[in-house]
Image (cartoon, rainbow, N blue to C red):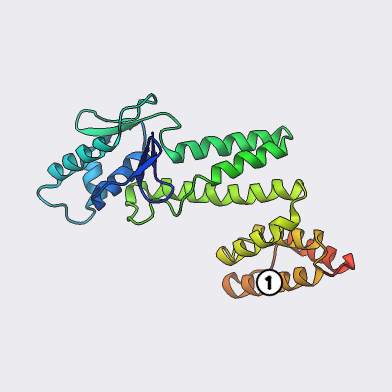
């Protein structure tokens, strides 16, 4: 069993994905899963669910949502459960009980493998980590301010892991396969210069000098218009390499 927040909030039990019926219950599931193994006071939960004007029935509503969520969390070997602690609640779980925790563990393991030179295994583990994402974090519901900082950390880690996986795959010689992937990524994240740098590397390695020059020009315009800066020295140095490769695909 696992609580899922890397996409639409849900619970996976026995291979079946179960989503809380009520929207507020889905938000509450996300709050609990992004702050696991710690007591969250009733006041903190109410403020997160109703940041402006909580209803008079807020406490009763929270208890109702908790009961509904407990109905989804079928007891299993991992012991994941929502516990009542004083005037609050906690999602008690291990690192496999929340997909976000497992994602972080796999990223750490992938980085460790890369650090020991196990690039093939690092690529596999990092790809497995990214495969846990089924969409945007808590897709379909608002992210309460109380867990925004945690959400930012996870989103940043997702992006940096994507870039690290590309680096590993470049080192493994997967340039040709990476070109279409990177072309899509720079469209989705046009101001992430590291992705453009990786695209240039992949294009040069596959003999596509003309496309590489065009990509560099597009990056230069984007950075100038959006940020008022030039490409960083590493990317500029790569331009010199492109100019002198004499390759064209």
Q: Would residue 104 appear left or right of 225 to someone viewing this image?
A: left
Q: Would residue 174 appear left or right of 11 to someone viewing this image?
A: right
Tell me residue 198's x, y (percent).
70, 57
Residue at (62% x, 72% y) in the render:
222
Quarter the N terminus occupies: top left
Q: Is residue 18 visible?
A: yes
Q: Residues within 10 Å of mark 1 (few under 14, many from 20)?
A: some
Q: Would residue 86 appear left or right of 240 to someone viewing this image?
A: left
- Residue holding disc 1: 220
Tell me residue 68's x, y (percent).
22, 40
- Name the one closer to the observer, 212 or 85: 212
Outermost residue, left direction? Answer: 56
Tell me residue 186's x, y (percent).
61, 64
Displayed quadrant of residue 32: top left
Q: Would residue 145 appear left or right of 233 to someone viewing this image?
A: left
Residue at (28% x, 45% y) in the render:
28
Residue at (60% x, 44% y) in the render:
127
């Amino acid at each position: 069993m696992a609580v899922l927040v890397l996409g639409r909030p849900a619970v996976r039990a026995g291979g079946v994905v179960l989503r809380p019926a009520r929207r507020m219950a889905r938000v509450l599931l996300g709050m609990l899963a992004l702050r696991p193994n710690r007591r969250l006071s009733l006041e903190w939960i109410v403020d997160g669910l109703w940041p402006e004007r909580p209803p008079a029935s807020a406490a009763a509503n929270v208890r109702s949502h908790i009961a509904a969520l407990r109905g989804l969390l079928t007891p299993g070997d991992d012991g994941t459960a929502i516990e009542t602690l004083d005037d609050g609640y906690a999602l008690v779980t291990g690192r496999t009980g929340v997909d976000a925790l497992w994602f972080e563990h796999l990223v750490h393991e992938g980085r460790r493998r890369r650090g020991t030179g196990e690039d093939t295994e690092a690529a596999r583990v990092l790809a497995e980590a990214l495969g846990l994402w089924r969409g945007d974090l808590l897709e379909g519901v608002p992210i309460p301010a109380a867990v925004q900082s945690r959400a930012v950390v996870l989103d940043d880690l997702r992006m940096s892991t994507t870039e690290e996986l590309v680096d590993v795959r470049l080192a493994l010689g997967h340039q040709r396969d990476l070109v279409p992937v990177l072309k899509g990524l720079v469209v989705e994240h046009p101001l992430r210069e590291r992705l453009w740098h990786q695209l240039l590397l992949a294009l040069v390695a596959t003999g596509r000098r003309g496309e590489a020059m065009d990509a560099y020009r597009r990056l230069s315009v984007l950075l100038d218009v959006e940020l008022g800066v030039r490409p960083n020295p590493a990317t500029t140095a790569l331009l010199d390499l492109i100019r002198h490769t004499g390759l064209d695909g």
